[in-house]
Amino acid sequence: MNKEGYKLVQGNEACVEGALAAGMRFFAGYPITPSTEIAEISAEKLPALGGRFIQMEDELASMAAIIGGSLAGKKTMTATSGPGFSLMQENIGYAAITEIPCVVVNVQRGGPSTGLPTSPAQGEVMQAKWGTHGDHPAIALTPNSVQETFEYTVKAFNLAEKYRTPVIFLMDETVGHMREKMAFKDASEIEIIDRKKPTCKPEDYVAYRPDEDMIPPMAPFGEGYRYHVSGLTHDETGFPTNNNEISEKLVRRLVDKVDKNIDDFSYYEEYKLEDAEIVIIAYGGVSRSAKSAVDDLRKQNIKAGLFRPITIWPFLEKQVNKVSLNAKEIYVAEMNLGQYVLEVERIACKNCTVKSINKVNGELITPEEIVKAIGGNK
Amino acid sequence: MNCNETTKKYYRANKLPHIWCPGCGHGTLTNTIVRAVDKLGLNKDEVVIVSGIGCSSRAPGYLDFNTLHTTHGRALAFATGIKFANPKLHVIVIMGDGDSSAIGGNHLIHASRRNIDITAVVFNNNIYGMTGGQFSPTTPFGDLATTTPYGNIDKSFNLCSLAQGAGATYVGRGTAYHAPLMQKLIENGIQNKGFSFIEGLSLCPTYYGRRNKKGSAFKMHTFLKENCVDKKVVDKDPEKGKNKIIIGEFYNNPQPEYTESYQVIIDKLQG
């Protein structure tokens, strides 16, 4: 670290630093490129903090282990990439229905299947929301720099704890493997949220009875609140039920507790949007090219701007709608064949034209490619 | 402690009656776990029971401990997370035969290999009961199931050999008929500081027994009574084990335990 408090840090390393700052004391994972550094650095750093690292036999087990660890009272995380993220979907759904906080990092690489293990992609945008079966809540954050990776990993933990739900931290290989200067924050400068615990006596505890904020207090196993946790649809006591009314109420509450609080965690960046007629929407690694493209287009007297969602799920409807009211054209640039653009179209197509800039060859979309697609001189 | 007292102390009476079919061996096996916990005088607040999916996996719901009913096959992976996060908890995992050795087979061998202090109890009824009687990895060769209508051509697992081969440090087999033995094996398993694997031969008169003409639940119990021989007897006279099912304590070889080994690393780094 230099005397101004900066250090040259890799994105994956920043993720671990953020997690540790947020209070992560348990990591379970399985090696996979390009996320492996997150496991390696966690293995190195956790025991010195009294925390625990375990390499599991696969990603199914890793996801299960972080849910178990969280239920035993720890803040927990796993990290993976595409193929591993597919395996984790089973128990992401379990964490969602049982409302057990945890953070799942997916450093996206080229797919489908084994795909391009060392190359960037953004093919799991829809999977981050719909990967596990059934209706369920989804929170996913996408950073575009090393500094932001640190800060939003902290937020990912805070949201998991506050809303009692798994949070997906959707990185891409570009961000995971880039090295930039990062400011290490003092613990006192970082807001840390811990899960709400019951204050009642154990005999009065109804494990899944929500407070007014729709979130039930969570007791860790081992502290006298003996209760039942099940992935079956359950009533407020946590025990399985087939009751139609209770089932409907549970699924709606799980989704609502996240969706109806979106104003609490609508993170995004606006760049030169005030008078923008051409709006580029981009996130993660691609947004850095998009920002550069905005500057290039401005030099050519094309009124361009950038809207960059950091909260990628739930979809930022309000903000995208506002952007679309002033835009003539929106271009969604992403390293997939058009995923986020579908949501943008849903909201914006009544107000302006929505177009797609896509690339799936394993390389980052360049500023020049964006400029060219928009009709400027590259 | 008599039956009513154990029920009152350890069962969630308002969740009974259970869902198991008449004659099923799972109730007896569940009770052997409860009696073992009682015998060892464990604090209920520090006992965690984890299960996967299937008939056996419904057991934790009836028990007044910290209970976790997880996804199919994954119980040991969840349990590993719990035990590793808070090693003072006593973690007992209840699984079925398909649950533990088909979909959960990978987790079983790796939990065994790590020698993490978990007691795994498999209720082996040789069939997938919850889904209506498909063959499992312990359905005997030649037997009938809904998915082996012409006879099973898969070889069956010897679960105890599998767990022992993978590194479990305490291994034994009891049955729903030999309840006192089963209880004793579970007590020993809980006391073993490491991964303990106890197979409990159960019986499924509804799906396995009926299709394979094994007779009533009473007959199936009688079969266990007449065809199981304790390893101690066979060790003295191998002839007595011929064509029999061997039960009893198979392996007891304490080794360094996973969470304790990790604690050594923590202590060293924290100086």
Image: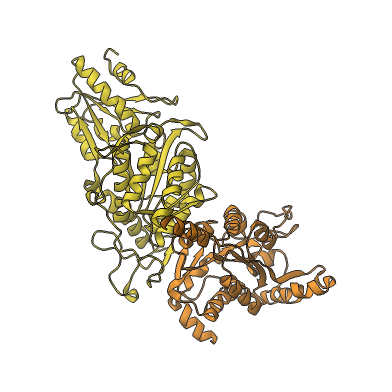
Q: In the figure, is residue B147 to the left or right of B53?
A: right
Depicted A374 relative to depicted A326: above or below: above
Q: Nearer the viewer, residue B122 or B153?
A: B122
Q: In the figure, is residue A156 to the left or right of B119?
A: left
The reply to whether residue A365 is visible in this rendering is yes
Which image quarter holds the C terminus of chain B? bottom left
Q: Residue at x 35, y 53 (%)?
A: A165
Q: Position of residue A338 (x, y in %)?
A: 37, 30
Q: Nearer the viewer, residue B96 or B84?
A: B84
Depicted B161 relative to depicted B203: above or below: above
Q: Position of residue A193 (x, y in %)?
A: 27, 55
Farthest top residue?
A377
Q: How many marks?
A: 0
Q: Residue at x 51, y 82 (%)?
A: B6
Q: Residue at x 58, y 54 (%)?
A: B110
Chain A appears in which tint?
Answer: yellow
Q: Position of residue A14 (x, y in %)?
A: 35, 41
Chosen colour scheme: by chain
Q: In the figure, is residue B253 to the left or right of A177?
A: right
The reply to whether residue A122 is visible in this rendering is no
Q: Nearer the viewer, residue A314 or B17?
A: A314
Farthest bottom residue?
B2
Q: Which chain is orange?
A: B
Depicted A107 relative to depicted A213: above or below: above
Quadrant of the image occupied by residue A212: bottom left
Q: Position of residue A354 (x, y in %)?
A: 28, 26
Quadrant of the image occupied by residue A319: top left
